[in-house]
Image (cartoon, coloured by chain):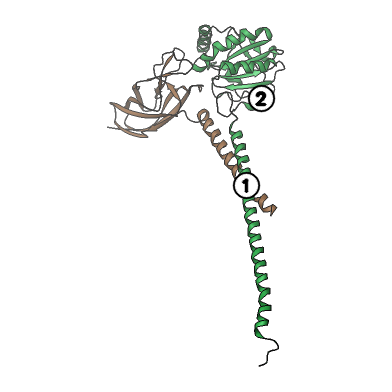
Amino acid sequence: MPWIRTGIRLATGALLGAAALLVWGQADDSARSILKGAAVEYLYPEQVTVTAGKANIVVLHFRIAPGMHINSHTPKDEFLIPTVFSIPEGAGVRLEDAGYPAATEFVLPLDPGNKLSVYTGEFAIQARIVAEPGNHLVEAKLRFQACDKNQCLPPKTILVPIDVIGKQ
Amino acid sequence: MVFERPLNSYNKAERRIPVKRNTLVIGVVLFILAVFAWVGWANWELRKQAAERALATVSQGQLVPDAAGGEPDPLSPLKGKPAPGFALEDLSGKKVSLASYKGKAVLINFWATWCGPCKIETPWLIELRNQYAAQGFEVLGVSTDDLDRDDQQKLGDDKKEIAHSVAQLHIPYPVLIDGASIATPYGGLDAMPTSFFVDRNGTVVAAEMGLTSKEDIEANIKKALGK
């Protein structure tokens, strides 16, 4: 009967259309996530216990979004923005020094002669901190500037929340 | 018991009718089955064709990349609309408005000193600007570098850094600063480089986000020039 066939065709078309929209929607989301999502994410630790009044090394782990890179702490070009970790004053925890990982070289396909000094994937910063006695919810900061091979995102500073317990 | 006619003759005569009826019924059933089979096959064919048509539509739906090479184009809402007006300072402190370029085709190129891909396309922009300037084409570079307006000393340093980069790149076209202040009407300027191609009437005819190619940029310049 024609109406059954029409119904079947409409249902098939609707399903395929929904599938098409789903595929398109996912493509749109993935593209947007590069631009709008977090280029760099703080992984761990959430909490550390250190000896109060003494220098302690805390290793902080971060992850860069796939396909992206950020400048290392020592980029080669004077205009490039370095990755910098910091702890605001008055947090009960003082940053004495930060050890940055070794950079990797990255070359843009259309500029093969220019080797960039970058971090990709997961990386760790060794922070040497001195904590006062007590519990401190530290809002440390990581400033960076991320790019992929075709475009760059504006410089950004993310919060690195760490619960630091200074024991005597 | 008395029979009016012999049992044999009665049976023979009556037996012929059910045989014919059975044949007819079997024939009708076979016919109906054949019709059902044909309808089923035709329906399967129709569904297959419908699926192929729908799949073709799906493929076409996915093939709508922007000039950046495959990603959906977030700048498309501005296409076909008047370019949002602005008046920004150049590096000498002089205000430059987009309206002052009416009658010319303009490439508004948002860039930043920290943007590597921007520096790759800048020589292309310079070459294309020189090539099409006589036909009424101009490039407006708009820096999106942060400016510290609360601290005059730092503001001066920020401007110096942009000027230093402009000199290093040998940019001959006007470079305006504080592009971030017009980010919203220009789609957010989520990433650099971002370019808008404006025709002689002030309408955005094309937009690109990210590094493309000199050929793509030239094609959009021609579009802006109405060629």
Q: Position of residue A73 (x, y in %)?
A: 39, 19
On screen, residue B13 versus residue A108, left or right, reads: right
Q: Nearer the viewer, mark 1 or mark 2?
A: 1
In the rendered image of this protein, which colour is used for chain B? Answer: green
Vertical order, A111 against A1 (above or below) = above
Protein chain holding label 2? B
Q: Secondary structure at mark 2?
A: loop
Which quadrant is home to the N terminus of chain A? bottom right
Query: Cα distance, mark 1 to mark 2?
Result: 42 Å
Rendered colour, chain A: brown
Image coordinates of residue A79 in percent, x first then y, are: 47, 13
Q: Which residue corresponds to mark 1?
A: B45
Amino acid under disc 1: Glu
Q: Could you classify mark 1 by the number of other residues whose Cα lies within 10 Å: few (under 14), some (14-19), or many (20 or more)?
A: few
Residue A82 image-quadrant placement: top left
Give the camera-side residue of A19 and A75. A19
Q: Nearer the viewer, residue B64 or A56?
A: B64
Question: Residue B156, percent across and down?
Answer: 52, 10
- Amino acid bearing label 2: Lys
The answer to whether B211 is drawn above or below residue B53 in the figure is: above
Q: Quadrant of residue B204?
A: top right
User: Residue B28, position in %: x, y?
Assistant: 67, 63
Q: Residue at x 40, y 28 (%)?
A: A121
